[in-house]
C-alpha cells in the first residue's frame, strides 16, 4: 500500500500574494464592522422645515386672464423703434460694471459646480521624487549603503476613488448646480433692471425736453399777452391790475423752465452712468417722446409669473441649493469610504530605479467614521437647516413682492389708460376754444388777447397730455419689467 502523498507546499509567489492580501482583507473586515457603528454618530432631529408659499396663497391664478399670457420679447425695448434707445441699452448691457460683476459671479458658481462634480470621479496622479542624501552609519540601513552618499528615487502612479455611498457628493453637486442656476437668474434680473432703467431714463428725458419746449411756447404766449395788455393800459383800456395779472405767470414759467433744464441734465448724467460713458457724450442727446404702446395690462396674474421673473427663479434656486446643503451636512455623519492604489518603482540609485526588483505596488480601502466630532457636525447641520429656512423665507418674500409689483404696475397702467380719453377730450375742447377765439378775432368780433389766452390754455393741456403719455410709457416699461421682460426659466 502506497503512503498518502505529502501535501504540496505553496509556492513562494502564492505566499507573497496571500501575505499581501491578508491585511487588505482585514481592512475590509474592519470597514464592514465600522459601518455597523454608524449609530455612534447620532444625527440630531431638526425642527420642521419652512415651506414655500403656494401659488394660490400668493393670489396667482392657474392661467392669466382669458387663458393667455402677455407675450414679451427679450429685447422688448425694440418696440419703441428708436435706434438711439437701442444703442444706449446695447452699450449698457455690454459695458455696465454691475453686469460684469454678475458675469463674474456666474463664472465663479460654474467653477464651483465643476469642482463639486470632480469629487465623483477618480483621482489619478503621477509623481517622481529624487533625493541625494548621506545615510547614517548607525541607522537601519546596513553597509555598504550605511555611511555613503546615495540617491533615492521613486517613480509612482496612483489612483484613488471616494465612493459616494451616502449621497454626500451628489448633494454637494446639486447644491453647486443650484447656486450656479441662481447666479444665472440673478444675472438676468440685473440685465432686466438695467435695461428698464435705461429705457425709463431715456423716455423721461424725452418727456422733460418736450415739456421744456412747451414751457417756452407758453412763455412766449404770455409775453405777447403782457405786451398787448401793456398797450391797452397805456391806451386807458385796461387797468394796472390787469397788467399785474398778465405779469404773474411769467416768473413761474421761467422757474419751470430752469427746473426742467436741471432735470434734463440729471437724466443725461444718469444715462451716462448707466451706459458707462462720460456725460459729455450725451450732451446733445435729444430724444422725442413716442406714442404709447398698444400694450395692455393683465390684471389676473397667472402661475407663469413665477417662471418669468428672474428674481423669483433665483430665489427658488437658492432654496434648492440650501436644501441640498442640508443633505450634504447630514451625509457627513456617515462613513467616508475610499479605495486607493499605486504602482511604480523605488530604489536607492537612479541606475536601479527602472529594474524589475525596484517595482512596488499596493492598494486598499480607507474608511473615516465621525465618532468624536459629532458636535461640530451637529452645529453644521443645524446651521445648514437654518440657511435653508432663510432661503425659503426669501423665496416667499420674492413671490409676494413679485405679485404685488406686477399687480401695482397693472393697476397703474389701467388707471392711466382710463385717463387718456378724458385728457384727449380736455385737449380737444381747448383746441376748439382756440379755433373759436381765432375765428372771432379774424371776423373782428374779438381781440387778440382772447386768442392768446386760449392758446395758453391749449399749451397747458398739451403739457398735461405729454405728462400723461410719459407716465403711461413709464408704467408700460415697469409692467414689462414686473412680468420678467421676456425672460423665462428654461431649466
Image: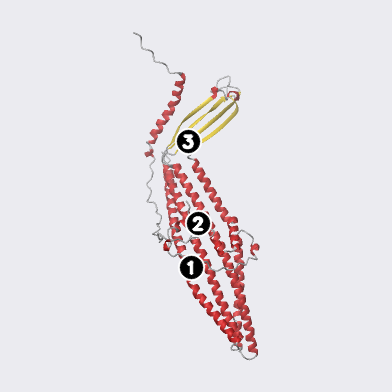
Closest to the observer: 80 or 178? 80
Q: Earlier in the sequence, mark 1 or mark 3?
A: 3
For the residues bearing labels 1 and 2, Cβ distance under 8 angstroms = no
- Mark 2 and mark 3 lie on one chain; the one further toward the N terminus is 3
Depth check, mark 1 against mark 3: the one in front is: 1
Q: Is residue 439 above or below residue 422?
A: below
Question: Can you tell which mark lies on residue 260?
Answer: none
What colour scheme has been applied to the protein in the rendered image? secondary structure
Q: CA distance from mark 2 to mark 3?
A: 41 Å
| Helix, strand or loop under label 1 | helix
Q: Secondary structure at mark 3?
A: strand
Question: Considering depth in this image, is 488 or 195 the residue closer to the camera?
Answer: 488
Point out which mark residue 487 bears.
2
Res 450 quadrant in image: bottom right
Quadrant in which the N terminus is drawn: top left
Judge whether 389 appears above or below 232 on screen. Answer: above
Q: Nearer the viewer, residue 410 or 342?
A: 410
Sequence-first tag of 1 and 2: 1
In the picture as drawn, the residue positioned furthest to the left comes out as 1
Under circle 2, the secondary element is loop
| Residue wearing tag 3 | 161
Are there few (<14), some (14-19), or many (20+) residues within 10 Å of tag 2?
many
Q: Position of residue 85 (x, y in %)?
A: 59, 62
Can you identify the residue that label 1 sits on? 413
Residue at 59% from the left image edge and 61% from the top image edge: 86
Residue placed at 47% from the left, 69% from the top? 414
Residue 181 location in percent, x, y? 49, 50
Which picture quadrant has residue 212?
bottom right
- Mark 1 → mark 3, Cα distance in angstroms: 60 Å
The x and y percentages for residue 204 are 57, 67
Few, some or many C-alpha atoms within 10 Å of disc 3 (few <14, some 14-19, many ≥20)?
some
Amino acid at each position: 500500500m502506497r503512503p498518502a502523498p505529502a501535501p504540496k507546499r505553496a509556492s513562494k509567489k502564492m505566499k507573497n500574494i496571500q501575505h499581501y492580501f491578508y491585511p487588505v482583507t482585514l481592512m475590509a473586515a474592519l470597514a464592514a464592522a465600522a459601518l455597523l457603528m454608524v449609530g455612534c454618530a447620532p444625527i440630531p432631529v431638526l425642527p420642521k422645515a419652512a415651506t414655500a408659499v403656494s401659488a394660490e396663497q400668493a393670489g396667482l391664478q392657474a392661467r392669466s386672464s382669458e387663458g393667455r399670457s402677455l407675450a414679451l420679447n427679450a429685447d422688448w425695448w425694440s418696440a419703441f423703434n428708436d435706434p438711439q434707445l437701442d444703442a444706449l441699452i446695447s452699450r449698457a448691457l455690454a459695458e455696465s460694471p454691475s453686469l460684469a460683476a454678475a458675469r463674474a459671479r456666474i463664472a465663479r458658481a460654474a467653477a464651483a459646480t465643476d469642482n463639486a462634480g470632480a469629487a465623483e470621479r477618480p483621482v489619478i496622479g503621477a509623481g517622481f521624487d529624487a533625493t541625494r542624501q548621506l545615510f547614517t552609519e548607525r541607522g537601519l540601513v546596513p553597509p555598504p549603503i550605511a555611511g555613503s552618499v546615495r540617491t533615492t528615487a521613486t517613480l509612482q502612479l496612483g489612483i484613488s476613488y471616494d465612493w459616494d455611498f451616502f449621497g454626500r457628493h451628489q448633494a454637494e453637486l446639486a447644491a453647486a448646480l443650484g447656486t450656479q442656476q441662481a447666479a444665472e437668474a440673478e444675472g438676468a434680473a440685473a440685465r432686466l433692471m438695467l435695461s428698464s432703467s435705461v429705457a425709463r431714463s431715456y423716455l423721461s428725458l424725452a418727456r422733460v425736453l418736450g415739456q421744456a419746449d412747451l414751457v417756452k411756447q407758453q412763455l412766449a404766449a404770455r409775453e405777447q399777452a403782457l405786451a398787448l395788455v401793456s398797450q391797452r393800459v397805456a391806451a386807458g383800456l385796461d387797468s394796472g391790475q390787469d397788467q399785474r395779472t398778465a405779469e404773474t405767470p411769467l416768473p413761474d414759467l421761467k422757474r419751470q423752465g430752469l427746473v426742467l433744464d436741471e432735470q434734463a441734465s440729471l437724466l443725461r448724467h444718469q444715462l451716462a452712468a448707466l451706459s458707462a460713458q462720460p456725460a459729455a457724450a450725451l450732451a446733445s442727446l435729444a430724444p422725442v417722446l413716442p406714442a404709447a404702446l398698444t400694450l395692455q395690462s393683465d390684471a389676473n396674474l397667472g402661475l407663469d409669473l413665477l417662471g418669468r421673473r428672474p428674481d423669483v427663479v433665483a430665489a427658488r434656486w437658492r432654496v434648492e441649493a440650501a436644501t441640498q446643503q442640508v443633505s450634504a451636512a447630514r451625509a457627513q455623519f456617515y462613513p467616508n469610504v475610499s479605495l486607493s492604489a499605486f504602482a511604480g518603482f523605488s530604489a536607492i540609485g537612479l541606475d536601479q530605479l527602472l529594474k524589475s526588483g525596484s517595482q512596488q505596488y499596493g492598494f486598499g480601502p480607507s474608511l473615516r467614521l465621525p465618532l468624536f466630532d459629532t458636535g461640530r457636525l451637529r452645529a453644521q447641520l443645524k446651521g445648514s437647516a437654518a440657511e435653508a429656512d432663510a432661503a425659503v423665507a426669501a423665496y416667499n418674500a420674492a413671490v409676494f413682492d413679485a405679485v404685488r409689483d406686477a399687480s401695482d404696475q397693472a393697476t397703474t397702467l389701467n388707471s392711466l389708460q382710463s385717463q387718456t380719453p378724458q385728457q384727449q377730450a380736455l385737449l380737444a375742447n381747448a383746441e376748439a376754444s382756440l379755433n373759436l377765439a381765432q375765428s372771432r378775432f379774424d371776423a373782428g368780433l374779438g381781440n387778440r388777447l382772447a386768442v392768446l389766452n386760449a392758446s395758453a390754455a391749449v399749451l397747458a393741456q398739451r403739457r398735461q397730455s405729454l405728462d400723461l403719455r410719459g407716465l403711461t410709457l413709464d408704467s408700460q416699461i415697469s409692467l414689462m419689467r414686473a412680468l420678467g421682460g421676456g425672460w423665462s426659466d428654461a431649466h
